[in-house]
Image (cartoon, helix red, strand yellow):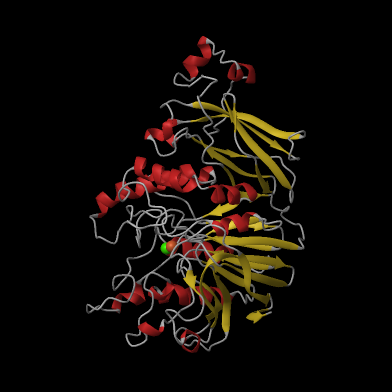
Amino acid sequence: MSDHFPLDRRSLLFGGASLALTSLAPNIAWATSLGGNPFTLGVAAGDPWPDGFVIWTRLALAPLGENGGMAMAAYPVRYEVAEDEHFRRIVRQGDVLARPEMGHSVHVELAGLQPSRPYHYRFFTGSEASPHGIARTAPAISAQVDRVRIALAGCQNYEQGLYTAYRHLAQEDAVDAVFHYGDYIYEGRAREGAIRPHVGDEIYTISDYRRRYAQYKSDPDLQAAHASAAFIMSFDDHEVDNNWAANIDQDLTPPEYFAYRRAAAFQAWYENLPVRRSQLPKANHVQMYRRLDYGRSLRMHVLDTRQYRTDQICGATGRETRPCSTAPLASGSILGAAQETWLGEGLSSAHQWNLLAQQVMVMPLLYPEQRAAGRFNMDSWSGYPTSRQKLVQQIKERNLSNVVIATGDVHSHHAGHLPSIEGDFNSPAAATEFVATSISSAGNGKEGTRRWGNMAQENPHCLLNLDKRGYQILDFEEKQLVAKIQVVDEVEAAGGHVRKAAKFHVDNRNPQLNSI
Ligand code: FE
Ligand code: CA
C-alpha cells in the first residue's frame, strides 16, 4: 500500500476539497495556515538502494506538547526531490498524508533515481517548508565502485552530552551512509544535574516515546547529521529498555505486560526514523535484519541482536556478585536460528566486502576488573559463545577473508580481531571488528587508562581502547578498507573540536588490522 493519495495539487494548495474527496479521507486538516512551522524535527533519509532511498519527516508544531502540538487529523504533505540544491531540476514530487496514527510522520520510498549520485529533498505542508536534506543513492548492483564511505554512529544519551560529534560528522565529505548501531534515545527519567535533562519520567507509553524522540530530534546537530547523509538504522536496547532480550526486560516484568511497552517503543522507532515500510511493526515485531548492497563493493548485513536472543545470564553485566551458573551459555543464542540461517545464506565472496552492521561487541573483551571472575559482558556476544562460534564457522566454511564487523554499545572506541578459536585471543583472526564509541553517552570521557589499567595486555587481539566520544569513518575500497577513528575533545560544553585519533587499514585477503 502506498501512502500517496489521489488528490491533485491545486486542491491541496487551495484547500479546495470537494465532497467526493472529503468522503475519501474525512479527517484531513486542510488549513493552509498552521500558525507556525511544523518541521521542527528536521528531515532524514535512509536505506539507500540503486534507484532511491527513504525520505522522512514528522510534523510537530510544539515538539514537547501534547500530540506534538498537532491536531489529531491527517495533514497533507508535499515532497520534492531535485538534482540540484536550488530545486530547479525536480525529478520526483508527490503528496502524502502525515497521519495521527503514525505520530504525524511521513515515510516516502523514492524510485526511479539514478544510481551513485546525491539528491536534494524537502517537504511542504500548508504554506510551510522544511529544511533541505541530501542523500546519495547506492551504486548499480553490478557496478565496480572505487570507494564506499560508511560512517558509524550511535549511543546518543541527550542528558550526558551535546551532539557536537554529529555536527562534525555532518561536515565529513561524501558519506554514502551512516550506520546507526542503536541507543538513539535513552528511556530513563530526568536526572538531576544532567547537562540537559530528559523531559518527564521513565517512558512507557506511545506518547512518552514520541515525546522523548521529539526532545532528542529537536537538537540542531542531530538534524544536521540527518540532513547530510542517509542513515541505515538499527536499534539496540535503550530504544525500548536497558538490556531487554526478546520479550524479557531487566526488571523481569511479566512478558505479557512488557509486550505493551515494547510495542509502543517499536511504533515510535518506526515513526521517528527513516526506515522502509518493510520495517513497519506488525504483530509486535520489527523486521530489522536486512541486507543493503553497494555495487560489487560492499554487502551490508544489518543484524538484530535484541529481538530473538535468549535472556542474558548473570544479570547481563557479569559483574554481579551473587552466585550465577554459566551453564546456560552453551544453549544461548543472540541471533536466533532463523536469522543465523539467513546470515549464512547471504555471506559470500560475491562482494569485495561483507559488513556485519550490528549492535553489541562480537570479539571478547576482558576488562581487568573482571579478570578474577573470568566474566565478560554477558549482554555482548561473549554471553552467547555458541553463536559466536557458529559465526566463525560460517566465515571459515566460506573461506572468507573479507568480513568486517561494525559495533557500538560500550561507549568507547575499540578496533580488533575476532579470534578464530573461542577462548584463544592469540588465534588467527576470523574477521576485524570496529567498535565505535558514543556520540554523547558517558560525557567527555578520558584518554588514557581511567578505567582500564592493563587493558592492552589482557586483550592482545584488541588494538584500540579509547574512552572518548566521537564516530568512525570506514572507507571500503576495492582491496583495502581504511578506518578513521574520530574523537571529540569536549561534549559537556559547546565548541568541542574533532580530531583523528587513529587510522587503520585492512586488506580484504587477510582480516588483519594494520595501524597507519
Ligand atoms: Fe549506549
Ligand atoms: Ca546499548
Q: Position of residue 480 (x, y in %)?
A: 71, 73
The residue positioned 39% from the left and 33% from the top of the image is: 67
- Please state if 451 lies on the left or on the right of 84 as rendered: left
Q: Position of residue 388 (x, y in %)?
A: 46, 75
Q: Across the whole image, how many numbered discs are drawn on residues?
A: 0
Q: Is residue 507 above or below residue 286?
A: below
Q: Position of residue 476 (x, y in %)?
A: 69, 66
The residue positioned 48% from the left and 67% from the top of the image is: 444
Residue 277 or residue 230, whichever sits in front:
230
In the displayed orientation, state which residue is furthest to the top: 19
Residue 20 or residue 475, whichever sits in front:
475
Q: Taking the image as drawn, is residue 350 in sight?
A: no
Q: Is residue 381 above or below residue 94?
A: below
- Please state if 48 lies on the left or on the right of 438 as rendered: right
Report the quarter where the C terminus lies: bottom right
Q: Position of residue 281 (x, y in %)?
A: 43, 45
The residue positioned 44% from the left and 38% from the top of the image is: 63
Quarter of the figure with residue 3: top right
Q: Taking the image as drawn, is residue 328 in sight?
A: yes
Q: Quadrant of ligand 2?
A: bottom left
Residue 66 or residue 326, whichever sits in front:
66
